[in-house]
Amino acid sequence: MTRPRIALLNAAHEPDDTRRNFRRELDADLVEYHCPSGEVPRSYAFDGCLVTGSRASVYWDREWIDGVREWVGEAVDAGLPCLGVCWGHQLLADALGGEVEDMGEYEIGYRTVEHDGQSPLLSGVDPEFTAFTTHSDRVAEAPPGATVFAENDYGIHGFRKDHAFAVQFHPEYDMDTAESVTRGKDELSEERIQSVVDGITPENYTAACETKQLFENYTQYVRQVSLDDATGATNAADD
């Protein structure tokens, strides 16, 4: 396999920037579904799936959120390698039996996160790294049986369960996306917004680009799982 086929579950209400960012970063053939429009895959005939960020909360009573939760939970049960980013991180936690809660505040801007070096998703990333964050919900409890591999003072920033990986931060953001998302936070004060925008500098962006390594790590993981599955099927056929 050279380019894995990955279902892109685009949960952004305005999907263009999200689409652009992930298509730029992933060396894969992405089949996109716009989740707020009610789109989800009809099968699990993919090599992996990625769930993006969203302005929604996973605990909202929305039919489309229920549909994504159900599909993702079944995809993980089927052994499909999944990656959740921000809202996708929270959605995976919720689908797999974890707990997501309103923080009562925002974590936003370039922040420091630490990881334990045990997850293949962050292989090659410094134990203490810079990442862009924007969220007011968090994973309060990881799913049963999951391993937390990244955290900061706001809480869990990365966990793994089986073939599912999830990160709270945004490795896909470019500087334009970081600024436009920040300026769109009407619930924040003008002073807070300007402070975050002032921190969106080439230096901070360059530092945060280290986290893009996780996309290569994820696609390598997807390829290895597909290879292992194919080898297992061949061996079973030979028995």
Image: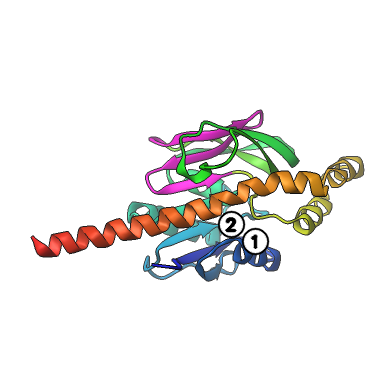
Q: Inspect the image, locate mark 1, and give the three-letter code of the amino acid beneath it.
A: Ala
Task: Please report the residue visible at 54 percent of the width from the left and 69 percent of the height from the top.
Answer: 33
Q: Badge 1, how many Cα within 10 Å: few under 14, some, many 20+?
A: many
Asked whether, in this view, residue 186 is left or right of residue 50, the answer is right
- Provide residue 35's location: percent of width, then percent of height: 56, 65
Element class at badge 1? loop
Q: Which residue is mark 2?
A: 52
Of 175 and 90, the residue lying toward us? 175
Counting residues from the start of the chain, the first of labels 1 and 2 encountered is 1
How far apart marks 1 and 2 lie (CA) works out to 7 Å
Q: Which quarter shows the N terminus?
A: bottom left
Q: Badge 2, how many Cα within 10 Å: few under 14, some, many 20+?
A: many
Task: Please report the residue visible at 81 percent of the width from the left and 54 percent of the height from the top.
Answer: 179
Of 33 and 22, the residue lying toward us? 22
Q: Nearer the viewer, mark 1 or mark 2?
A: 2
Q: Inspect the image, locate mark 2, and give the three-letter code of the amino acid beneath it.
A: Thr
Q: Which quarter shows the C terminus?
A: bottom left
Task: Please report the residue visible at 41 percent of the width from the left and 70 percent of the height from the top.
Answer: 42
Position of 159 relative to 212 (above/below) = above
| Magenta-colored span | 144-167
Q: As drawn, which residue projects farthest toward the top?
A: 153
Dot 1 and dot 2 residues touching (CB under 8 Å): yes
